[in-house]
């Protein structure tokens, strides 16, 4: 998709400084549980950014490839790979076609906090299904579709489409893509994936209202 603009290129410096200046990654027990034992597996980190999850997975013993559309975020990932080599290969590419990768070439795909930044959900999920081996897993997390921070008005939950991020921190690119929960589930199902586990973390009262802010899924590719 030649027309894809790498929105994160525009915010790469501040995004990197905000989230990963030292190449360290806070623990995410939900993601860790959903991914499980990756020792010896070939894992693709989809929309890997500056490689936080790629390094985490490599440290767990996986053979990792990271793909992202933003050359500027990948430059940070490659810098860190030079400083602390983990044999991670970083590839610039579009999640919507994953053209650089052979079919059935990965045991797992991990996509942390990125699907809502990618315009085409069905092509992305289809590309993930293509590169997964039969029975392989797709672990993903997104901003929960029922909870959209930085949106200036309550709008139609069932109306999928781009939305402007307002009053957001300066590391945010200007827009993202809303999809209802059913859109996510049906796209995964149409690509032949079944949902093995779903987690909706939230801040419980009194700290929060118990409304989930993130959505995590572990999906399994069809076996035939
Ligand atoms: C919020 S960041 C998350 C990065 C990383 N997964 C993490 O958790 O640190 C979203 C990422 O999606 C990437 N992205 C957006 N559109 C993409 C596309 N079409 N193909 C590949 N990556 C894309 C951005 O460049 C950015 O690195």
Image (tube, grey):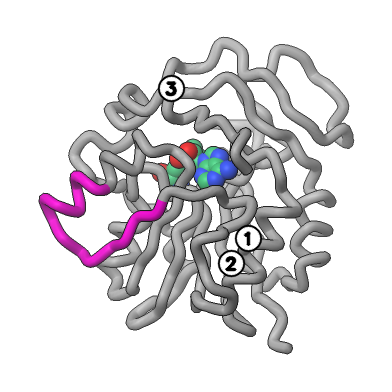
Image spot of residue 87 (x, y percent):
23, 66
Q: Is residue 26 above or below residue 155?
A: below
Q: Which residue is mark 2?
A: 138
Q: Which residue is mark 3?
A: 10
- Marked residue nearer the N-terminal end (3 or 1): 3
Q: Which residue is mark 1?
A: 217
Pointer 2 residue Cβ closer than 8 Å to ligand 1:
no
Disc 3 on helix, strand or loop?
Answer: loop
Q: Is residue 132 left or right of residue 12?
A: right
The nearer-to-camera label among 3 and 1 is 3
Q: In terms of depth relative to the viewer, which is nearer, 49 or 4?
A: 4
State the CA–CA distance, disc 1 to disc 2.
8 Å
- Tell me the quarter of the image containing the N terminus: top right
Q: Is residue 143 visible?
A: no
Tag 1 near tag 2, CB within 8 Å? yes
Q: Is residue 55 left or right of residue 157?
A: left
Dot 1 surroundings within 10 Å: few (below 14), some, or many (20 or more)? many
Q: Is residue 51 visible?
A: yes
């Amino acid at each position: 998709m030649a027309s894809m603009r790498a929105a994160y290129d525009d915010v790469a410096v501040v995004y990197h400084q905000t989230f990963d200046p030292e190449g360290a990654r806070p623990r995410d027990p939900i993601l860790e549980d959903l991914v499980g034992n990756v020792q010896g597996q070939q894992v693709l980190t989809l929309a890997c950014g500056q490689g936080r999850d790629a390094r985490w997975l490599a440290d767990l013993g996986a053979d990792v490839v990271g793909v992202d559309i933003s050359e500027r975020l990948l430059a940070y990932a490659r810098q860190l790979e030079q400083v602390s080599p983990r044999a991670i290969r970083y590839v610039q590419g579009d999640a919507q076609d994953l053209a650089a990768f052979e079919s059935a070439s990965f045991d797992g795909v991990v996509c942390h906090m990125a699907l809502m930044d990618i315009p085409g959900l069905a092509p992305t999920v289809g590309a993930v299904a293509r590169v997964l081996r039969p029975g392989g897993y797709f672990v993903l997390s997104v901003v929960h579709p029922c909870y959209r921070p930085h949106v200036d008005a309550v709008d139609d939950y069932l109306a999928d489409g781009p939305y402007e991020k307002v009053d957001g921190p300066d590391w945010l690119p200007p827009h993202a893509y809303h999809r209802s929960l059913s859109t996510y589930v049906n796209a995964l199902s149409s690509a032949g994936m079944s949902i093995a586990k779903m987690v909706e973390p939230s801040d419980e009262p009194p700290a929060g209202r118990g409304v989930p802010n993130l959505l995590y899924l572990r999906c399994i590719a069809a076996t035939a």
